[in-house]
Amino acid sequence: MDTNTCLLCRGTQIEKLFSVKDHGISGEQFHLSECKSCHFRFTSDAPKEIDIAPYYEASKYISHTEDSASFVNRIYFGIRDLMLEKKYKLIRNYSSGKNFLDIGCGLAYFLNHAKSNGNEVLGIEVSEQTAQQARDKFKIQIESPQTFLRGEIKSKFDVISLWHVLEHLYNPADYLNQIKVNMSKDAILVIAVPNHNSFDGKKYQQYWAGYDVPRHLWHFEAKTLIPWMENQGFKNIGIHALPFDAFYVSLLSEQYKGNSLAILRGFFSGMRSYFSSLRNVKTTSSIIYIFKLKNS
């Protein structure tokens, strides 16, 4: 990672904003920086890619586990299951295509839902342990990022998705270049990312769970992501809220602050964020962006 140059505008005037604690796994502090030119935010002292694996320890990292012992985990799994059909229906508003590729598929619940609706599916997952769990449970083909980036997957896909994945990628432009190769003529690209310009992002600041350092390298909002994607050869054709993320993120953020009654406080904060997003989708806790290739 080049922390002296902005990923988006290539500007070199970078300022540090504040420190954020990794509450989920290590307890370490990391710095958030912002480009003075385009206001894009990123984690400026994230570990090198070769050193990041311990920060994704499967037993603690929620998208790689099925441990429902904690209340927070049960909320996460409940929201995940509730949103599967909503995500699928949203995609059907833009594409009737039958070939799905999910990058960063985790335990492959979304792919399994698409498969159960009669689609051909393939996943990309960096954790071999997680990928094998998904293969065993759902009988879905899952390949490594290296296989994808080397261009060894020759199929064309009608729907390519990155659900809370783009912010994790050390080389996002490389992924987008290969995605363009694997997109069918009328394919859509679905990207969901946290939005630090949300009500909850502004409220909780360094305690905001959406920063999730050091796993989240890049911190987007609509005014930074859309122009960057346009520079990468895509056009934005839709923007939508992930409505329940605000409740989960607010609950975690209240816990990170050490507040009493975190569940109650988080619920009311989530409600305020949710109603804010009804007025302006660009203030929702997490945003789903729909893109197509510019020449399609």
Image (cartoon, rainbow, N blue to C red):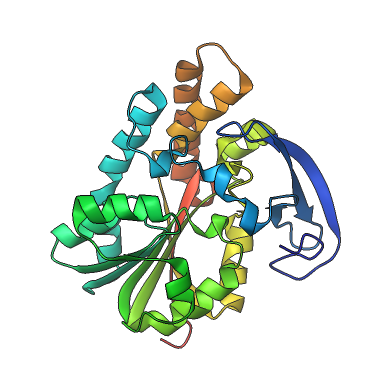
Name the residue nearer the viewer: 36 or 78. 78
Tell me the quadrant of the picture where the N terminus can be found: bottom right
Residue 43 visible (yes or no): yes
Residue 105: % across, % down = 37, 57
- Residue at the image point whose x is 31% and y is 54% from the top: 132
Residue 275 visible (yes or no): no
| Left or right of residue 287: residue 215 | right
Q: In which quarter of the image is residue 37?
A: bottom right
Residue 268: % across, % down = 47, 23
- Residue at the image point whose x is 21% and y is 50% from the top: 137
Task: Establish if 151 lies above or below 41.
Answer: below
Name the residue nearer the viewer: 296 or 278. 296
- Residue at the image point whose x is 32% and y is 37% from the top: 66
Residue 200: % across, % down = 56, 35
| Left or right of residue 94: residue 195 | right
Residue 36: % across, % down = 82, 58
Task: Establish if 14 lies above or below 10.
Answer: above
- Residue at the image point whose x is 27% and y is 49% from the top: 84
| Left or right of residue 292: residue 228 | right
